[in-house]
Image: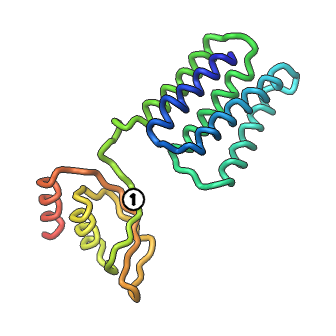
Amino acid sequence: MIGIDLIAIAVMTFGLYFPRHRRRDLVVAYLVVNVGVLAVSAILGTTTVGLGVGLGLFGVLSIIRLRSSEITQHELAYYFAALAVGLLTGLSTTVNPLIVALVALVVAVVAIGDSPALFRRYRQQTIVMDTAYTDETTLRAELERMLAAKVHRVNVLHLDTVNDTTTVEVRFQLVDGADVARTHESLVR
């Protein structure tokens, strides 16, 4: 089971996460968290303390890591996958087909859910506009023009009428020029 864990975390970290996101500091975090959880849960699996303490450990480690620094949602997914794989493999002393399948399932879900091909034209961004927009329709039209995209959601984070700026969080879909022009025309009407 230790070998299965090490293969799974290596595939997830070096085969999926780092090539896609290039954040070196989290590579170390994922590896250490996974192997640490594996070691602790392996000991817990041999004692009478059992599963309750293992799940408690999962929760405590999650809280500690989440309060340490800000990480994105996809980085959080890798983090929890590293914890899950470590617990699954560490709590079993023998190679169990169900656990092997669950480890493979966790890695496969990370691979599919974080695939660059999945929703590849969708983006989310925080933008500071150089105008104070009080009308959401006008703001949406300007964002679509500026981003050459179909805006799905706009959340005004800060409207500064003194300095004439608007800070927005925008969720959008990249589209070709013709689609943007049609969308802009329909908003203006």
- Residue drawn at 37 percent across, 79 percent down: 165
For the residue labelled by badge 1, is the local secondary structure a helix, a strand or a loop? strand
- Which image quarter holds the N terminus? top right
Residue 117 vs residue 183, the one in the foreground: 117
Q: Single out the residue that lies furthest toward the right.
A: 48
**Place of residue 44 in the rendered image (x, y in percent of width and height, measured from the top left):** 82, 26
Residue 21 vs residue 139, the one in the foreground: 21
Q: Could you tell me how many numbered marks the image carries? A: 1
80 left or right of 173 in image: right
- Which image quarter holds the C terminus? bottom left
- Residue drawn at 23 percent across, 67 percent down: 141
185 left or right of 26 in image: left
Q: Which residue is mark 1?
A: 125
19 left or right of 177 in image: right
Residue 32 vs residue 173, the one in the foreground: 32
* Amino acid type shown at disc 1: Gln
* Residue 157, quarter of the rendered image: bottom left
**Place of residue 126 in the rendered image (x, y in percent of width and height, measured from the top left):** 41, 63
- Residue drawn at 60 percent across, 16 percent down: 100
